[in-house]
Amino acid sequence: GLAITSSNATSHRIWKDANGKLNIGPTSNTDAFVIDLNGKVGIGTTSPAELLHVEGSNATINVRESGAATVKMRAGSVGRIGTYSDNDFSIVSNSTDRVRIKSDGKVGINTTSPDQLLHINTGSVAAGNDNFALRIQNPTSVTDARIGIAFAVNANTGNNWKGAAIQASNNGSSGEGHLTFGSVLNNSFTEHV
């Protein structure tokens, strides 16, 4: 191998190990950077499992544009990906923003300017055409199988919340549903309409 030294007490080395892997790193951290025979790159590991494998305590990949967003992918007790700066975060497909999360937490689907906590924009649809922006499904097809949306009006969680709800119920024969409106007390729905 090749050793690179300076006045610093820690030297760096470039060497090929007994398994043919190329290693680059300080003598104190032999798995700092590894390229295996399959072209997989390991940072913090001598056994990369993917094309790029980063491993360590709170392992983080940091991408930053000078003067703009800092995007990080971090593994810890909770996996995280997003901006760690006062910038929006987008999920993109086919070079188009599909989901935009604003720096204030508002989420837009098919819009880059959400003005509510969740804003779904279906785009232009001709009059008279069905235009379902959201589908909530209960795959159980028995009589009175329900699916709904709840509106909690206190900070309670678990079975102790109060509010209102809209539910759809399966009629049990053709599978068509009907809507019911009602109140919720301690997680129990009472139909009113």
Image (cartoon, rainbow, N blue to C red):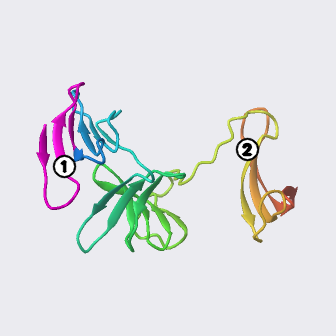
Q: Which residues are magenta?
A: 1-24
Q: Is residue 180 left or right of residue 64?
A: right
Given residues 56 and 73, the one toward you in this image is: 56
Q: Nearer the viewer, residue 144 or 67?
A: 67
> Marks 1 and 2, how far apart in space?
69 Å
Q: Quick check: 105 above or below 182?
A: below
Using the rendered view, name the quadrant where residue 15 is placed. Answer: top left
Secondary structure at numbered mark 2? strand
Q: Amino acid at mark 2?
A: Gly
Specify whether 105 is left or right of 163.
left
Residue 71 image point, x, y percent: 35, 61
Disc with the residue nearer the chain's start (1 vs 2): 1
Q: Is residue 130 rendered magenta in the image? A: no
Asked if residue 133 lies left or right of residue 36, the reply is: right
Q: Residue at x 23, y 54 (%)?
A: 10
Residue at 53 percent of width and 54 percent of height: 133
Which part of the image, by quadrant, shows the C terminus?
bottom right
Residue found at x 28% / y 36%? 51
Asked whether residue 169 appears in the rendered view, the answer is yes
Expressed as whole percent of the image width and height from the top left, the position of residue 130 reads 53, 50
Labelled disc at residue 177: 2
Q: Secondary structure at mark 1?
A: strand
The disc label shown at residue 12, or none: 1
